[in-house]
Image (cartoon, helix red, strand yellow):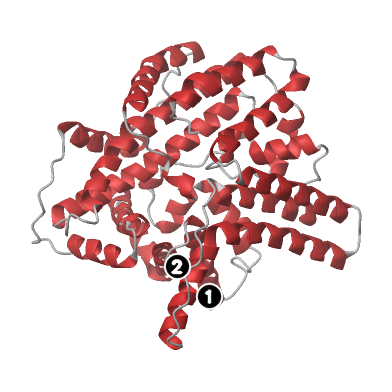
């Protein structure tokens, strides 16, 4: 079940919100937990059993950890908890990839052809679920957070449906107080509804339209795209992935706000960043924060020498690449990010700082767009061919029809990405919540109408 489906918009969501509003506060967590498990089980009936069993294991390990002061025993317990979660992720997400690498190595070095491994279906949102569960175990071990008081509250943290499938990645101690008690204010409903509608519009009206252009340019069987179409497709995909994922984050944050939860922001105008370091402080903020807190800082952070610092950066972004997908394209994409972050530390950051900010942001956007080709291409060979087309200005474009609405959406998407820089400095009047909600209604009708008439188009980050 996805946020843009008619079943969710006109069936599941109204029913859940009605129950949530009508029942006494002491029943709301139970209602949300049952609804969230049903929401996930609709698309992943098998994996929900694994997730439930893994969550119970988390609780058992954390309670054993809280009951002992023995440092070595606590370390063994946290290691066991993290290993169990990573093992779950490794099996579902990386086992098939690792088996393919093993088959290739066996064929190249030993001349042995091993039988292919049976296919393992990748559960939706497994990476987000596992990373959140790891934060709970590690934070209790560090003393940053406390063990969950109730099984129901921890399960709701894991399965809370607004953020379940694609984040933001939430730390348990950041939301524990809200799980125990939260307000149900009218302002939360209006602000949350408005945020949800804007997210829905970003996904359905912009991201899905840009997906049509990107799919046309990246079509594997249509031949080389040519210089102009290659760049057009790359820019279209840059807009698609931004409006798709930030649209989901807006919808998740908005739905959570309606339910009384406050989730962290996940995007902050990333295409206005100057340099990859700033880009990653603005893009998928919850993942960047997770990698900083649970990988970069334990590796030594900025407290190590220059060589070790660069190695740590590469490790972090190779892990980030693999987190996004079990394929060589994601590994190389992660290395691409690490390469530019290393260059920024060496000299590129100082060079960008001397440029006008608009030019620095344009250069960064161009470099990020080139990197997105690795993210979008099905394999490294296809990525190399596509990048070669982008590097040859004289290469004629193959025939492709870009409709007027696609051109207008492309222009609107680029304008929206740049709009914050065009805002006047003087404070503007903020409309009242009801006025903002009323203004969002036509947008809701337009977006919901399109969602009902087009082919199913899932969120990009559901595969992660």
Residue furthest to the front: 115
Query: Sequence-wise, which precedes: disc 2 or disc 1?
Result: 1
The image quadrant of residue 352 is bottom left
Compared to residue 258, the image places residue 69 above or below, namely below
Please provide percent x and percent y for residue 256: 59, 29
Compared to residue 188, the image places residue 377 above or below, namely below
Crowd tier of the residue under label 1, counting other residues whose Cα lies within 10 Å: few below 14, some 14–19, many 20 or above: few
Front residue of 425/212: it is 212
Q: Residue at x 18, y 54 (%)?
A: 222
For residue 306, the mark is 1
Please provide percent x and percent y for residue 94: 53, 62
The reply, left or right, for residue 266 in relation to residue 275 is: right
Front residue of 283/127: it is 127
Compared to residue 199, the image places residue 24 above or below, namely above
Gap in angstroms between the C-alphas marked 2 and 1: 9 Å
Tag 2 near tag 1, CB within 8 Å: yes
Asked whether residue 191 is in view, the answer is no
Q: Which residue is mark 2?
A: 345
Q: Which element type, helix, strand or loop, lies under badge 1?
A: helix
Crowd tier of the residue under label 2, counting other residues whose Cα lies within 10 Å: few below 14, some 14–19, many 20 or above: some
Asked whether residue 233 is in view, the answer is yes
Q: Residue at x 68, y 49 (%)?
A: 133
Q: Residue at x 45, y 57 (%)?
A: 277
Q: Which element type, helix, strand or loop, lies under badge 2?
A: helix
Please provide percent x and percent y for residue 452: 36, 24
Front residue of 408/97: it is 97
Q: Residue at x 33, y 66 (%)?
A: 380
């Amino acid at each position: 079940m996805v946020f843009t489906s008619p079943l969710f918009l006109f069936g599941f969501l109204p029913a859940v919100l009605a129950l949530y509003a009508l029942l006494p506060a002491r029943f709301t967590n139970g209602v949300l937990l049952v609804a969230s498990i049903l929401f996930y089980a609709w698309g992943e009936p098998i994996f929900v059993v694994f997730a439930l069993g893994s969550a119970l294991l988390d609780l058992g390990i954390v309670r054993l950890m809280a009951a002992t002061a023995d440092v070595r025993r606590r370390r063994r317990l946290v290691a066991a908890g993290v290993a169990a979660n990573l093992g779950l992720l490794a099996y579902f997400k990386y086992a098939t990839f690792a088996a393919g690498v093993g088959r290739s190595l066996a064929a190249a070095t030993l001349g042995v052809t091993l039988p292919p491994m049976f296919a393992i279906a990748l559960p939706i949102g497994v990476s987000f679920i596992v990373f959140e569960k790891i934060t709970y175990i590690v934070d209790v071990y560090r003393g940053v957070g406390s063990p969950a008081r109730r099984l129901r509250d921890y399960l709701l943290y894991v399965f809370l449906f607004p953020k379940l499938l694609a984040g933001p990645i939430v730390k348990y101690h950041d939301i524990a107080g809200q799980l125990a008690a939260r307000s149900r204010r009218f302002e939360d409903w209006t602000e949350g509804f408005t945020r949800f509608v804007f997210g829905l519009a970003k996904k359905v009206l912009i991201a899905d339209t840009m997906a049509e252009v990107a799919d046309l340019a990246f079509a594997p069987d249509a031949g080389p795209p040519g210089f102009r179409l290659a760049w057009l497709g790359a820019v279209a995909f840059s807009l698609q992935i931004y409006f798709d994922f930030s649209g989901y984050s807006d919808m998740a944050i908005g739905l959570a706000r309606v339910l009384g939860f406050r989730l962290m922001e996940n995007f902050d105008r990333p295409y206005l960043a100057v340099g990859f370091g700033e880009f990653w402080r603005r893009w998928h903020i919850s993942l960047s924060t997770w990698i900083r807190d649970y990988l970069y800082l334990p590796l030594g952070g900025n407290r190590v020498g220059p060589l070790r610092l660069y190695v740590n950066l590469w490790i972090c972004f190779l892990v980030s690449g693999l987190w996004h997908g079990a394929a060589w394209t994601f590994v190389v994409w992660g290395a691409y990010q690490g390469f530019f972050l290393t260059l920024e530390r060496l000299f590129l950051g100082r060079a960008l700082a001397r440029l006008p900010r608009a030019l620095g942001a344009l250069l960064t956007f161009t470099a990020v767009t080139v990197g997105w080709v690795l993210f979008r291409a099905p394999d490294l060979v296809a990525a190399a061919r596509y990048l070669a087309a982008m590097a040859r200005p004289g290469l004629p474009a193959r025939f492709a029809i870009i409709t007027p609405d696609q051109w207008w959406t492309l222009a609107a998407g680029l304008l929206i990405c740049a709009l914050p820089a065009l805002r006047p400095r003087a404070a503007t009047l903020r409309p009242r919540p009801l006025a903002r909600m009323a203004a969002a209604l036509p947008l809701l009708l337009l977006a919901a109408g399109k969602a009902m008439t087009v082919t199913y188009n899932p969120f990009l980050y559901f595969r992660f």
